[in-house]
Amino acid sequence: MNYDIIFTGGGAAALMLLYKMSKNETLSKKNILVIDKEKKDTNNRTWSFWTNQKTDFDIIVHKEWEKVRFLAPQIDKTDRLTSLKYKMIRGIDFYNFVNAKLSEFENIEFLQAEVNEVKSISENEAEVSLTEEFGNKIFRSEYVFDSRFLKEDIPPKSNDYHSLLQHFLGYTIETDEPVFDSETVQLFDMRLPQRNAVEFVYILPFSPTKALVEYTLFSDELLRNKELYKVRLESYIATKLGVENYKIEEEEEYGVIPMSDYKFEQPKAKNIIYLGTKAGRAKPSTGYAFLRMYRDAKCRIEAFQKTGNFHYNEKFNKQFETYDSMILNIMERDPADIQRIFTDMFRNNSIEQVLLFLDEQTNFLSDLKIMASVPPMPFLTSIKNLVTGRKGQRLHQRLGNVAMVKV
């Protein structure tokens, strides 16, 4: 059963690339198969991002904000963004929008099944096999885009790199009385005890009485059970928001995202290409991935238009890779320091400048100003660890400028 292109996994990264393909005259005629074990027909997640650029998905942005708030024990700061906007897209809106476009093409097929293995069998052909439950069926194609992020893909503990988890639980709630400032997104509320983890709550308000409230942790282990997330989230709603009576409007949003400076190994075969988290598209120090996946899809289509294949020379910013490793080192060593670092970072810089920094959209001089505005000791310790420890062997050559400024 042969196709031109097969997607194993049909999440955001795959659907973004498929949408881009559908708008390309040549690629839109390819015979394409998308295999995913889950139907994408529920509002199982949201994607948030900040940008000053247009995307193909602006039409389905559920809500956008021009004001951003940061809270910690010694600061409550709100800024109006000038060039950026903070945007949120609901999962169901994204799925429906992309699937409506793809339904125009009879040559794009969807199969709900579980993939057993993806392998290259020749220079021009790859093979996808299904599990026994789905009859061990085999499909072949010229390219396979694999975005399945499996449990075994999570980087194991190692002295060679940092590996943490971002895990969260959120409720979309409706209150009886006005509680929320619908014009302001609360990016971080770090007034929580930092219990061997970076803990905060962010709030995306849709109206004065309705918002997504999400409790988030950065740590090396999950909480004991899901009930503990609920206890902490509900405690925040009661104590920090002062809300006792509310109803949960939508199903809980629960997820786990790897945060690691581990270099995800890419396939040696040119006809198998990883997408999404499997390709390292989640930013190591924040977990944000939507724009990084979108930029990757755009680059792959541009590469195909120029060369006839989907490979492109990706430019890695070594400077930001170093920052990510330093921040992960602090999270791993002393998570409570992140609360102090972020407090000073947001206090001494505009929120917009911090957001640009976190999205790797700043220049070196701007980065130095931001780095100089935070407590130096945690970063000096990180620099020492990265240079002298095994985790620093790969970074030794590119820490010079950062170390010199901090010293």
Image (spheres, helix red, strand yellow):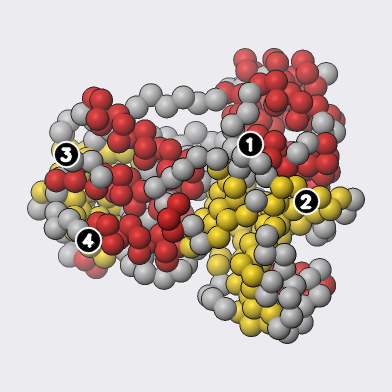
Q: Is residue 240 visible?
A: yes
Give the residue at mark 1: 356
Give the residue at mark 4: 103
Question: Measured along the vertical axis of the image, is residue 39 above or below residue 281?
Answer: below
Mark seen at residue 201: none
* Residue at far left of view: 1
Q: CA distance from mark 3 to mark 4?
A: 17 Å
**Residue 25 location (% of width, % of height):** 18, 40
Q: CA distance from mark 4 to mark 1?
A: 36 Å
Give the residue at mark 2: 78
**Residue 146 location (% of width, % of height):** 32, 46
Going from N to C along the chain, the mark reached first, 4 or 2, is 2
Mark 3 in CB contact with mark 1 (< 8 angstroms) = no
Q: Nearer the viewer, mark 2 or mark 1?
A: 2
Mark 4 in CB contact with mark 2 (< 8 angstroms) = no
Three-letter code, disc 2: Thr
Three-letter code, disc 3: Thr
Q: Residue at x 35, y 64 (%)?
A: 96
